[in-house]
Amino acid sequence: MYGWTGNILRIDLTKKKTVVEQYGTSMASDFLGGRGFAIKILWDELPLGVDPLSPINKLVFAAGPLTGWPLPSSGKLVVAAKSPLTAGYGDGNVGTQAAVQMRRAGYDAIIVDGKAETPTFLLVQDNSTQFLDAKDLWGLSSFETEKKLRSLHGRSSGMLLIGQAGENMVRFANVVCQEGRAGGRPGMGAVMGSKNLKAIVITGSRELPSAHPKEMKELGAEAYKEILSKPSYAFWKRQGTMMTIEWSQENSVLPTYNYREGVFENASEIGGFAMEKIKVSNRGCPQCNMTCGNVVKDSGGGDSELDYENVTMLGSNIGLGDLKEVATLNRMADEFGLDTISLGNVLGFAMEASEKGIIKEKIPWGDFKACQVLVEDITFKRSLGGILANGVRSAAEKIGRGSSRWAMHVKGLEISAYDCHTTPGMALAYATSSIGAHHKDAWIISWEVKTGREGYGVEKVEKVIELQRIRAGIFESLTVCRLPWIEVGFGLEWYPKFLWAATGMEINWETLDTIGDRVFNLIRAFWIREFGEKWSAEMDVPPTRWFEEPTTIGPLKQSKLDRPKYDAMLQTYYEKRGWDMRGIPSMTTFSRLGLADAGKQLGKRIKLST
Ligand code: PTT
Ligand code: SF4
């Protein structure tokens, strides 16, 4: 096999055993890698109803056939498991040297199973895996942990680690590396913590197997050059994703005061131009010449890496208009290993609950000091923090008094940073995303705003599906960064060429689309298998707030979504996907995608349509 190493490293923490397993070519060609491998493994191997924080859950780190080559933005991997936040499929995409080193060590994926008796870190060096004592690391922040491990194992080794939030199994703890790369929103850090696994350190020294090494080198060089030549490149390097704040404000989709509004009175104070004034450097993922992490000095003088989602969720969504203070909260999240999106979401929820007088704590909008205390309380699960640490769905169930109507999540995953009072297409994208409410699968909002935001028509449904194929299926399975394509217009036609150079296989877009759909539908099957008869179309509906509480400020004030029209749009989406009225793939759909066995298995749990 070229392109893929063909190897998976299995690590059993309970028995302190490792096995290197070869997988077949059909796994490679049917699922590509990354998210595709992760769902295939979790579907095949996880028993139904596993407690996500029990030793039986499996944590999968999977790269793709393009990972690690000198190709644009190819230094990423997917981390996946059954999610402790949603109880469904969960994953995230992390830019990390660990992706490159894992492949150089000879593995396309690592599966971590079981639970170590005491805090442990793993040292993977080519063929050797050591289970090492992490007692001295337990209790340290992700930054401190990385510093210590780097002093022992060198700057170039790859690292995946957790902060104190992961150790304490906060349900939206993520996996952190390189002081500002983080991934696995639906609690992948908590799964790592539940296994007593503080870190994985990886180094590899092997050549990656390429079908056409000379062409690979040439294509890579040409591709990097092409990115540099793009007109939007220079501005991207200045602001990265931060430029989206101005855009969201102008278009009334900037989440504000727990998604009550789409405009924020202090947006210019936290936007891309304000950020440029305090920016000190750029950081990024390996193999990337678009390095988009904006490093700024926070209010305490520390370095903090800002992106759109972080700043919006810890800024406008909680009414905080001081960018340096936002940066401090962001740095705390990175150090503790908390997902910034879910964090900003639960903070906004707590502030609203406080304002409404349904909790006793006083947490005024934009109160930086109160937020600092609450972030620590969440990390260490103290008082109200302990309730919020389980995520906004669970907090609303606990607090009650109608708060579920404005608990902003889908399927238990907190909504990321776009308000959807005026964008039904984006609401559908959130509602049908494969891990709960994340923008990564179908960022339709810019297209929607450009082409007409009012409609609930079939063209929007088709666009959501098209984007889900490309982004949720193909990019997540290749695991390469999608930002060169989206942000500077690097053409999609490059990717089949890269695949050919790596694997020797001529894989056209039609085949890639089918792989994208296969991965998406198997993830759907995983969710339905877990929920059984409890599954219904209600799982694919965004929060009540967007239907019932219109916005009150800005050019689009008095806007809200229309529930009957949304329901009709959802049914059109199901039809186009080949799913029944409950959103369950039919047997024909499973068979068309080569998933007949999965369909048969699911059919034992819940009745499928033909
Ligand atoms: C992603 C989500 C995002 S999406 C952001 S900012 W974004 C938040 N970043 C966090 C952070 O930082 N620290 C922290 N403690 N929590 C954070 N949670 C949030 O996580 C990220 C970039 C970005 S920046 C985006 S859009 C793109 N996402 C990609 C993706 O999902 N797939 C893909 N093939 N390419 C992508 N490229 C871009 O990567 P999750 P990263 Mg990410 C500090 O993790 O779980 O997928 O959620 O990993 O290496 O930091 O790159 O405006
Ligand atoms: Fe990482 Fe940004 Fe480069 Fe994507 S564009 S690979 S997120 S640095």
Image (tube, rainbow, N blue to C red):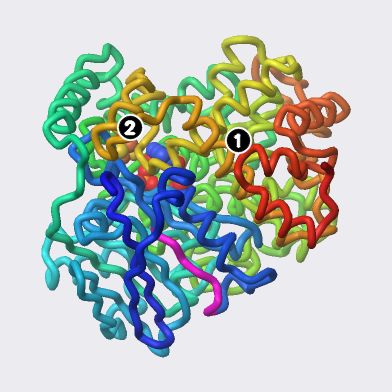
Name the residue rendered at 67%, 29% in the picture.
420
Q: Earlier in the sequence, mark 1 or mark 2?
A: 1
Residue situated furthest right in the rendering:
564
**Residue at the spot x=68%, y=15% of the render?**
459
Q: Residue 196 placed where, x, y %?
A: 42, 79
| Residue type highlighted by circle 2 | Met
User: Which residues are drawn in magenta?
Assistant: 55-61
Q: CA distance from mark 1 to mark 2?
A: 19 Å
Q: Residue at x 49, y 28 (%)?
A: 267
- For the point 72% across and 20% down, the residue is 557
Residue topped by disc 1: 256
The picture quadrant where one finds residue 437 is top right
* Disc 2, SS: helix
Name which residue type carries label 1.
Thr
Whether residue 75 is situated above or below residue 453 in the rendered picture? below
| Nearer to the camera, 265 or 73 | 73
Residue 65 image offset from top left, x and y in percent: 32, 44
Q: Secondary structure at mark 1?
A: loop
Pointer 2: what residue?
275
Whether residue 544 sits left or right of residue 208 in the image: it is: right
